[in-house]
Image (spheres, helix red, strand yellow):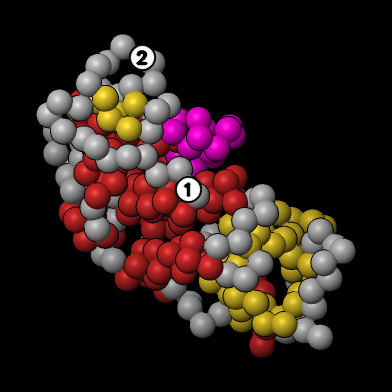
Amino acid sequence: MHETIEGIILKRIPYNDKSSIVYLYTQNYGFLPVIVRKSNSSKNNHAAFIIPMGIIQTEIKLNHTRDIQSISKINSEYYLLSLRESYDKMNIAQFLSEFLYQILKYPHTDQNLYLFLKEWILKLDTTPIELCSNIHIFALIKLLTFLGIEPENNFSQKLPYFDLKQACFTEHLPSDYIEQKNISELWSFFLSSHYENALLKKVSRNNKNHFIKSIMNYYTLHLDIKLNFTTLEVLQAIYEDYPQNA
């Protein structure tokens, strides 16, 4: 029996001349690799729906003995026109999809996480691009809660330094795992901020780059994984297009 499954596209890998493997994150089944065959039908042009962080509905006959599922049909209720037409938004989507592929490619089903990611994609599509320079940072920080590794936000004048290893703020700065004050303040701000406040926060290009590096180091420490990116440098170049505080 076929089942309609909605999923978010994390990665696409060409398999042969006639098909590709697409890695989805789904609401009910978590990480789900599927094989997508090229279609000559204009009514179901699969390629039109396969974009980073695209939201698709698929017809799948699930076979739990297989590592890769076969789909018979792809559709989408969310065309994401603004995302598709914006080079910068597409780069943001590519960065987050590359990140999510690395941290979610293990058994992990969380309906609330799926709904958060879906909402984030729709906001990326509708938010003016000049307000999007922090949108990926907002996602990276909020994902910590869903993964069970959210740090304690005990920042204060007496505890001004963020300790990546201990996942809390501390009084002293003696360790390689403790951030300088300016980056520690960003940790505290984004841990407590809502979407609108996060997007309006002005962060210098240099601080933003250091902050993202700090976030990646935190994930590496607490998930015990090594993260690799091909899109991060392109993403950092986006900051140059919009005014930043010094």
Residue type at tag 1: Gly
Q: Are the two marked residues, 2 and 1, in contact with CB atoms closer than 8 angstroms?
A: no
Whether residue 124 appears in magenta in the rendering, the answer is no
x, y percent for residue 98? 55, 48
Q: Is residue 136 left or right of residue 51?
A: left
Whether residue 224 appears in magenta in the rendering, the answer is yes
Quadrant location of the N terminus in the rendered image: bottom right
Please name the residue shown 55% across and 62% down the image.
110
Element assignment for label 1: loop
Please name the residue shown 87% across and 64% down the image.
65
Say which of 241 and 170 sits in front: 170
Q: Is residue 187 left or right of residue 53?
A: left
Q: Which residues are magenta?
A: 217-232
Please say if 126 is above or below 211: below
Residue 42, by quadrant, is bottom right
x, y percent for residue 103? 57, 46
Q: Is residue 75 visible?
A: yes
- What number is the disc on residue 148? 1
Q: Is residue 91 visible?
A: no
Task: Give the Cα distance between marks 2 and 1.
Answer: 24 Å
- Of the numbered discs 2 and 1, the one sitting upstream in the chain is 1
Q: Which of the two marks, 2 or 1, is nearer to us in this view? A: 1
x, y percent for residue 189? 22, 44
Residue type at tag 2: Ser
- Furthest toward the right, the residue is 65
- What number is the disc on residue 175? 2
x, y percent for residue 122? 39, 70
